[in-house]
Image: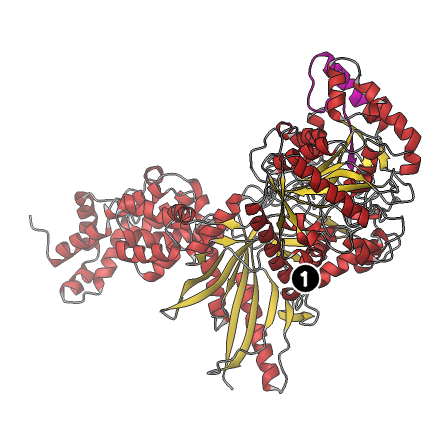
Amino acid sequence: MELSQLTIHELQKKIRNGSATAVQITESVFSRIDAVEERVHAYIRLLKEQAFASAQKADEDIKRGDIKLLTGIPVALKDIVCTKGILTTCGSHILHNFVPPYNATVVEKLKDAGAIFVGKANMDEFAMGSSTETSYFGPTFNPWDLERIPGGSSGGSAAAVAADECIASIGSDTGGSIRQPAALCGIVGLKPTYGRVSRFGLIAFASSLDQIGPFTKDVEDCAIMMNVLAGYDPRESTSVPENVPDYTQFAGRDIKGWKIGIPKEYFIDGIDAEVNNALKTAMQVIEQSGGQCVDISLPHTQYCVATYYIIAPAEASSNLARYDGVKYGFRAADVRELLEMYKTTRMQGFGAEVKRRIMIGTYALSAGYYDAYYKKASQVRSLIKRDFDEAFKICDVILTPTTPTPAFKIGEKTDDPLQMYLSDVFTISTNLAGIPGISVPCGFTSGGLPIGVQFLAGHFEEGKLIQVASAYEKNAKIEKRRPKL
Amino acid sequence: MDFEAVIGLEVHAQMLTNTKIFCSCSTKFGGAPNSHTCPVCLGMPGVLPVLNKKVVEYAMKMALATNCAINKSCEFARKNYFYPDLPKGYQISQYAYPLAEHGHVILDVNGEQKKIGITRIHMEEDAGKLLHDEHNPVSYVDLNRTGVPLIEIVSEPDMRSPEEAADYLKRLHEILVYLEICDGNMEEGSFRCDANVSIRPRGQKEFGTRTELKNMNSFRNVQRALEYEIKRQQYLVENGGAVVQETRLWDDAQGATNSMRSKEEAHDYRYFPDPDLVPILVDDAWVERIKEELPELPLAKRERFVKDYQIPAYDAGVLTSDKALALYYEDVVKICAKPKIASNWIMGDVMKFLNEDKRDIRQCPISAQSLADMIRLIEEGAISGKMAKEVVEDMYKTGKSPQTIIKEKGLVQITDEGELIKAITSIIEANQAQAAEYRGGKEKVFGFFVGQVMKATKGKANPQLVNELLKKMLAGPPQG
């Protein structure tokens, strides 16, 4: 097996016992990139030179016995997290030349933990999309089927892990942008509780929904990544000073006596039959693991997509106002006055989906419409949150499909925004409620496309998610396959 | 027709914190363009605001000083609009849930107290500044001021004349400066005012259509702009026209207001709660702590001065208009125990000198101790009031104590009876005719003799003693 195919915890062992060096691991990852990246296009920018410099430094640290959580581990960063001195585009033309003079908090944390940055991963422009097709830099292709999308918006980060173009990666999740591509690429993806991982340096899409999280090859790696990422950040007002447990302790524990909520609203017509079957099997695995599946109801589920598509665009319309050509990023050429500069810059700098959402959001916040849209959506959001509060009185965690279908074809939904939006139908509620969610592989379709199961828990209960996901992973014994690239 | 003006004011006051409201950049005025900036106040991608707690506490002080109720929970909202001096494309302000509401300030209108309601006080960040190249079609942006903390104080439409409006502004200004939360500098923009004004026939309850006035950078200009605007509106109405709801800019040079934008052109700011900031929860204990930190406010001080020092309300008003001046006055009185005399000297000579040099009391070279000493020296008869005028001027110029100046100039008053008797004797001898007139009942001549004595002593004679001795000696030849 190539080093690039291993997990963080497997590589840690090799590093500790001297059977692999950081440079060797990095070489393995970059040779894999050389072999497949042209077809996958997981990255906007590779950081090869820096990666090898970090690897050399990591090997020196290792020699001294200074081995941290991610020492020598090649990690990819979604191009939405700011990297000091390194181009950060957010998948957009308007930031095609933006070099931040600061690091996102998570970048600092990963660096401090010894991670090696492989590159900046591709994404939907400003994280707006579910397929990574809206990237200014072209789409990413699903490693399991290059004619299909990897999911989105963190499609590059997911594809990079699935294709062994890195060991783990960072994504961001506003309505499913980690969990959906994790499911479609057959890996583990976790969206933490809102306030658990710092948003400082995460280029904002919808501030009240955005959250950074990891993509990994298995649940144990997910726990390791969370140990690095989680924690209070005084630079973020919505960061929560809540104690961070050692998440790896939860991996491997059983779930005997746990109640697993099965919300009837998530098992609806329109779910792909093979996805549905895989989920049914997942429930059996849960029961076999000592858990008990109980029927629950999340009565406001049907309003989630509508609520989300008011709140997220409303916040986005304001968050993206700063891209005006005045201070940084793209500025339209040959303009004579201010208004023309604004209009042309934004017209040429943003893609269609971003413009659509800016317009929806602007409309929803406009005088005379605010009460009917934004305010109403905020009220419904409270009800959705309450649904979960009530549910978690009955059950420990909730089990749902991550996506209604496996990965769809490139271009299949680009002309139908509503169909595209519905691919996030099972992941959106989590962000609205601010709770954590994880997607874990739960099998393949007959065509060989990965399927994911999603577990949800109450606020700051990431430990429970690791526990249930790891118990499921252990007992489901999903066949270890690798995409044929 | 007899019209009445209805005026409401919106005041923006810059809070005197060392750092900006949402980042740790300096709030200092001036500085090379963009030298007081960081990724947060520059509105770079991915950065987040963190509230400066001092700003909340300063705003709470103003709220308490103006009798507002502080809301238990308030929140920041985004005010969205595009302008190059606004790097995020929105200003973080407060909208639906401000910090404080329902306050008032008391004015003295023709000797009667009048309450001017305060609708709300909220916190917000300032925008930057554009610099336009005079020779080229280029504009530059200076974001040093971006993120500087402001509070906005919105009044009820309770003022009925430009004088009242100016008076209200002065009271607000005075309170802000007293609280030491704002330097009150109008030229540097630390204290700015917009006005809403309408007119209506006296007695009518409904408000007329209002206009909003901007760009008035002094108390005087606020008053002038309002006077102009009231006349303009009155002229319109009296001539069959109608006031249009709009924003108008005051042109100082022209002495007129000009239309800036109509109601239709007004921005839709699309306010919504800022998701990057959490609601501010204010509990009673916090309010109590801030209350305890409040200094004595101008109105209370004024009333205390009248009561404790028995000085006229006018004097108390002048002396308390500046906290430092009031402190100076109290220091002087503490030493010399002559409240009214101290008030006269401060309001007279001392303030005249300071005004001439455009200084304030903090820069006064005469220490409270020196002024009190001088007052005591007059009381003790060591110098005359007339001499004191000269002494105080020297004290101001040199910063020396009155004792030193008197000594240096040899200004000591002649209080030696023997010396004065000698002088008076020779004057009476030389002016026998006038002495006879006096004795004959022509008392006016007395002044002539006083003058002669003063002349002979070069003004150094103690006037009281001269009076006494002259009366005795003119009445008859000295006894023994």
Helix, strand or loop under label 1: helix
Is residue B87 visible to us here? no
| Nearer the observer, A265 or A201 | A265
Q: Residue A263's spot in the image, x, y percent?
A: 65, 50
Name which residue lies at 66% across and 69% down.
A368
**Side (left or right) of A310 relative to A273:** left
Q: Which stretch did the figure color magenta? A: A53-79
Question: Is A124 part of what is drawn in magenta?
Answer: no
Task: Look at the image and name its color scheme.
Answer: secondary structure
Q: Residue B7's spot in the image, x, y percent?
A: 52, 71
Question: Is A67 part of what is drawn in magenta?
Answer: yes
Would you name the residue on which mark 1 appears? A365
Is residue A330 positioned above or below B2 on the image? above
Residue type pointed to by label 1: Leu
Is residue A441 positioned above or below A9 on the image? below
Mark 1 nearby-residue class (10 Å; few <14, some 14–19, many ≥20): many
| Nearer the observer, A417 or B5 | A417
Name which residue lies at 74% across and 31% down.
A218
Q: Residue B58's spot in the image, x, y percent?
A: 48, 48
| Nearer the observer, A415 or A407 | A407
Q: Quadrant of the N terminus of chain A?
A: top right
Is residue B62 positioned above or below B407 on the image? below
**Side (left or right) of B77 relative to B309:** right
Is residue B243 visible to us here? yes
Name which residue lies at 29% across and 55% down.
B340
Residue at the limit of the structure toward the left, as seen here: B480
**Side (left or right) of A157 relative to A204:** right
